[in-house]
Image: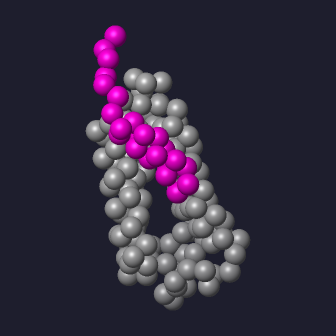
Amino acid sequence: MSTVARSSWTGWVVFAGVLLLISGIFSIVQGLVAVIGPNSYYVLTAGSLWLFDVAGWGWWNLIIGVLLALTGLAVIGGQTWARVVAIILLILSAIGQLLLIPAQPWWSLIVIAIDILVIYALIVHGRELREES
């Protein structure tokens, strides 16, 4: 059995899991508002938002939100597969935020920065959480 020295980054990995959970809940709410709410919630251009209509964008947010929330819970639990899935979802999140920069520049840049920090924590220090649990 190998021993991995615990660093303060273990807390950051748990924080990354909590951020994934919160981000997932926000995406679920955002997706529900888009699916069942008024179309005026989103910035529309000729009835569509980039590649999707509002309902399509809402379903996308809803699905990604559920995946983020479940993955966040698994990351907190120290599951190795969850770190891999979380990194993939965070990359998709960052790419999605690039599409939203014209509509919400500050929010998009903040989310991209957080995504990068969480990816770093999961890649470099995620194994420490697994060894601890």
- Residue 100 visible in the displayed image: no
Say how the picture is coloured.
one colour
The one nearer the camera, 112 or 7, is 7
Q: Which residues are magenta?
A: 1-24
Q: Report whether 92 appears left or right of 19.
A: left
Residue that sits furthest to the bottom in the current view: 46
Q: Report whether 24 appears left or right of 113.
A: right
Q: Report whether 130 appears left or right of 46.
A: left
Q: Is residue 47 above or below residue 26?
A: below
Residue occupying the point 60% across, 80% down: 41
Look at the magenta stretch and give its main secondary structure: helix
Image location of residue 83, percent across then percent down: 41, 38
Image location of residue 104, percent across then percent down: 43, 78
Image location of residue 34, percent across then percent down: 63, 72
Q: Quadrant of the N terminus?
A: top left
Q: Is residue 78 above or below residue 56?
A: above
Image location of residue 105, percent across then percent down: 38, 78
Residue occupying the point 33% across, 33% down: 7
Magenta stretch encompasses residue 20: yes
- Residue 102 visible in the displayed image: yes
Q: Is residue 90 above or below residue 59?
A: above
The part of the image, by quadrant, that contains residue 106 is bottom left
Residue that sits furthest to the right in the current view: 36
